[in-house]
Image (tube, rainbow, N blue to C red):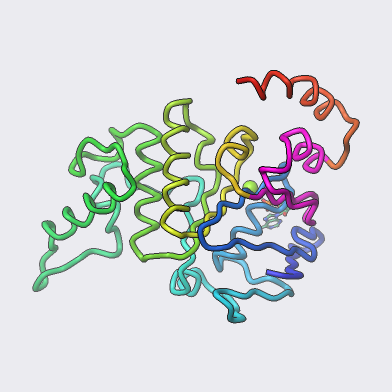
Amino acid sequence: MTGVSKRFGAVQALKDIDFEVAAGEVVALVGDNGAGKSTLVKTIAGVYAPDGGNVVFDGSPVSITSPSEAQALGIATVFQDLALCDNLDVVGNLFLGNERKHGGALDEVTMEQESWRLLRELSAKIPSVRIPVASLSGGQRQTVAIARSLLGDPKVVMLDEPTAALGVAQTAEVLNLVERLRDKGLGVILISHNMSDVMAVADRVAVLRLGRNNGVFRVADTSSTEIIAAITGATTNAVTARAARRAPQEEQS
Ligand SMILES: Nc1ncnc2c1ncn2[C@@H]1O[C@H](COP(=O)(O)OP(=O)(O)O)[C@@H](O)[C@H]1O
Ligand SMILES: [Mg+2]
């Protein structure tokens, strides 16, 4: 997308944003609270119509005016709240609103087979697809939400803070999953506050600050200190100075 802007009344949430993700690439989208990350994601997902700018998908100009249009193009979003139904099992959640039928009745067998196929493809560690998702761990729930987003065979997947509520082992599992999506050739947009997640899994990092682009970095050529400086908009404030002092230790670990 180029030159994309979005205003809410007096608030200029996005101003002249350029943003790009390629097939087989993970781009992290970072920025402070209020930087415009969610607004950008919702614009790509068709929740908000931009006030201006151009969007090109797969080489053609598009205007994404509704979530169903985004989905039809092949843009899937896993929102932060996941929107899972706790009382339904994994199969029920994966196919919610998209149930497979066989002569009028639910085709449970096909749905269950499809569920296993999908989870195996993601090397997901889910003990059973017939247990309510309420009994799954945070990482497993995230996995189910990501698997569901893949049912429509998307080309781009956006993940909003997928590791925010997870412990160390579960975070590693979800980051593996992100790499698997990249290996499948998907473009992945990863919103995260966690700099070590970003550095571990992203190919590029796009920084938003106060609704504007504030740098795009290749992870291979940058440091978390440099990214944090771009996020805060200063290289000499307390946060970056502290990060700079800690950076040598981080590099060892
Ligand atoms: N629906 C909305 N109505 C009015 N203002 C909004 C709305 N959504 C976001 N904003 C404002 O736009 C700015 C960017 O918000 P947001 O995209 O949520 O930032 P982030 O996700 O980076 O924290 C903030 O100032 C926020 O208050
Ligand atoms: Mg947000």
In percent of width and height, residue 133 lies at 29, 40
The residue under the point 43% across, 40% down is 176
Looking at the picture, tell me which residue is in the foreground, 160 or 235.
235
Q: Say whether residue 242 is left or right of residue 186.
A: right
- Image quarter of residue 213: bottom right
In percent of width and height, residue 136 lies at 31, 34
In percent of width and height, residue 21 lies at 60, 61
Q: Is residue 225 magenta?
A: yes
**Where are the magenta residues, as a range?**
204-232
The residue under the point 50% across, 51% down is 79
The residue under the point 79% across, 66% down is 16
Q: Say whether residue 96 is left or right of residue 2.
A: left
Outermost residue toward the right in this view = 236
Q: Say whether residue 73 is left or right of residue 110.
A: right
Numbered-mark total: 0
The residue under the point 62% across, 75% down is 56
